[in-house]
Amino acid sequence: MPESFFFDSYAIIELIKGGVNYRNYTNVKMVTTKLNLFEVCYFLVRDFGEDKALEYMKSYSDFIVDFSVETILAAAKFRLVKKADRLSMVDCIGYVLSKNLGIKFLTGDEKFQNMENVEYVK
């Protein structure tokens, strides 16, 4: 069984763009949320058009996991603790969710680089 990672929006976009440093993550099990796919969809519509965005959204929809109210609360508390880092709500939810699921948070966001449970790839 392949290793699982929580892909933040940056990681998904790098995968789509064929980023050299993300080639090692093409055969892992992807986990993400609808919020992350919204951010990816915005990028795709902006840069490639609606048809390409819809194509990717359909292919990535199988990797979506839901999150609980407790995860939202924990993410809000985490964001408050890290207020100086100005982390996005979406990233805070993904980070907390990845910890809850026992998988690494895959990102290229430098603000997460030295945090526990993070696979930082730029």
Image: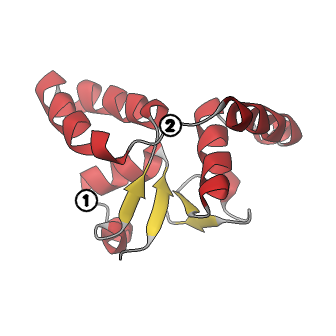
Above or below 107: residue 67: above
For the rendered model, the colour scheme is secondary structure
Marks 2,1: beta carbons within 8 A: no
Q: Quick check: 91 above or below 105?
A: above
The quadrant where residue 43 appears: top left
Location of mark 2 (residue): 66
- Specify few, some or many for label 2: CA neighbours under 10 Å numbering under 14, 14-19, or 20 or more: few
Q: Which residue is mark 1?
A: 18
Q: Point out the tag, 2 or 1, that comes first from the N-terminus.
A: 1
Closer to us: 37 or 120: 37
Q: Secondary structure at mark 1?
A: loop
Residue 39 horizontal/vertical position (percent): 42, 31
| Residue 93 locus on image (x, y percent) | 63, 39
Is residue 13 rendered to the left or right of residue 47? Answer: right
Q: Which mark is residue 63?
A: none
- Which residue shows up at 37% across the image and 49% down it? 12
Say what amino acid the circle numbered 1 marks. Gly
Q: Residue at x 26, y 51 (%)?
A: 16
Looking at the rendered structure, the secondary structure element under dot 2 is: loop
Pointer 1 local density, CA inside 10 Å: few below 14, some 14–19, many at least 20: few
* Residue visible at 36% across and 74% down in the picture: 2
Q: Is residue 115 left or right of residue 66?
A: right
Q: Residue at x 68, y 47 (%)?
A: 96
Q: Nearer the viewer, mark 2 or mark 1?
A: 2
- Figure quadrant of residue 22: bottom left
Q: Is residue 82 visible?
A: yes
Label 2 amino acid? Asp
Residue placed most toward the observer, 81 or 43: 81
Whether residue 53 sits left or right of residue 22 in the image: it is left
Locate the N terminus by quadrant.
Answer: bottom left
